[in-house]
Amino acid sequence: MGRLLCGVILSFIIPGRARSGSAAGFSTGFDQERATESSHASAELDQRTRELEQMIASISTPDVDALARALGVPLVVEKSGNHDDESPLSQSSQLRIFEGTQSGESPACVLFRSGQGAGEGGQPAAGDWTLDYLAWDGTRWRASGLDPAPPGLVSPADWKSRVLPLSAKIISREAGEQMLALLLYDAPAGAVYPLVYRVKEHQATLAWDSRSEESRYEAWSGGQIKFAKPEAGILPAMIASGIADPGLLVFERASNRGFQVRTTYVWKGNEYAPVHTEYEANEDFRLYEFISALHLHNFQAAYALIDPANFLGTDQPSLEAFRDAIQKSWSEFLDDQLFRASARDPADGNGHAFELDEAGKKSKYLPRFSSGPKFLLTSLARREE
């Protein structure tokens, strides 16, 4: 990630990310509507699987080239391991066979089918993708649908309108069983959602869905998913990284502001659970910590983030003097306010400015910091605009 990562997790850090789950308080009618949509989506998936198996019934050999020709799609090798240049599929359908299939294993692959062309500017278009696992069972090709309706209150139609397939990879091989990870890209949020399938007897069944309401997975904007090297009998750790999206200080995606976050997940029984989160130590992260601490009226935590003598302009700084200065001159930080990081402006001579719009009045704040790795706040100026 470039700079040192800060591994200290504070209770006020990152209140929540882009999730595909729901908020509390939806009506029972809304729940029933979503349940009906999910039921219809599952029935459509079952029907599609039957039709796909009928389409490839004439392929009586494990020849994946013949399978691709029958489906009318190109054959692509799905590379094993992690790849930084991984990007959403183009609008063209394709059959991906897994790299490094071990001796004696029956061939298996994933079929990505697109139902529409490119989006704006020739970019891949979300929506109408279907994803299927195909495996040779010794006598015929068998199919398993890999795009179930998202659980919870997310509309299947809404989800399909925004998702793009990213990749599929075998992350674990044990006797008679494999684990398959499917990565989906949520285009509007710029986030990646993993799904894990258990492959047994040539059929893939969903083992864990990061989109479920019970999932503890956090999807980061501009994110990546990587898997550690597997150990015998243990699923590999999953590392999710991206740009943090804090709730009290908004960073525009195109502003080149913010800080990176990386969370390590381990497989615990039936889910990937978070065990460790690291944040990039830079000025924007320190600024977010400072705003968050004051929002919670945690003056001691905020005081630890400043250079007391320089910030307070005295050679006898104290926590009490800091508390008094905040309450008298910076009381907006103690309220329930939403600040916004400014775009970098060379004219300001400050690359870490942030703003507050309150009751028609706009204030711009110009912080300054000590050098890294601490990046302590040395001063803070306010300018009315």
Image: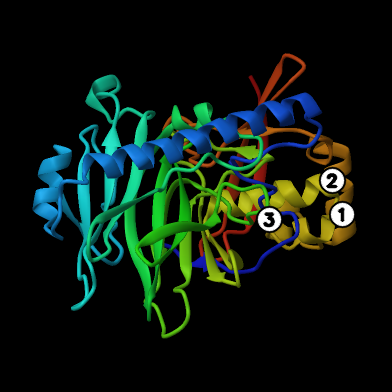
Q: Which residue is mark 1?
A: 321
Residue 364 in which image quadrant: top right
In depth, the one of 266 and 8 nearer the eye is 266
Element under label 2?
helix
Residue 278 in which image quadrant: bottom right
Instruction: Find residue 239 and report its horizontal and vertical position in percent.
Output: 46, 64
Task: Classify 10 Å Cα crowding around label 3: few (below 14), some (14-19), many (20 and above).
Answer: few
Residue type pointed to by label 1: Ala
Q: Which residue is mark 2?
A: 325
Task: Classify 10 Å Cα crowding around label 2: few (below 14), some (14-19), many (20 and above).
Answer: few
Residue type pointed to by label 2: Ala
Of the two numbered discs 3 and 1 on the same chain, state the one appearing first in sequence: 3
Element under label 1?
helix
Residue type pointed to by label 3: Asn
Q: Which residue is mark 3?
A: 310
Q: How is the image coloured?
A: rainbow
User: Marks 3 and 1, how far apart in space?
Assistant: 13 Å
Is 109 on the left or on the right of 50, as rendered? left
In depth, the one of 212 and 12 nearer the eye is 212
Query: Residues at badges 1 and 2 in contact (C-beta under 8 Å)?
Result: yes
Q: Is residue 252 visible?
A: no
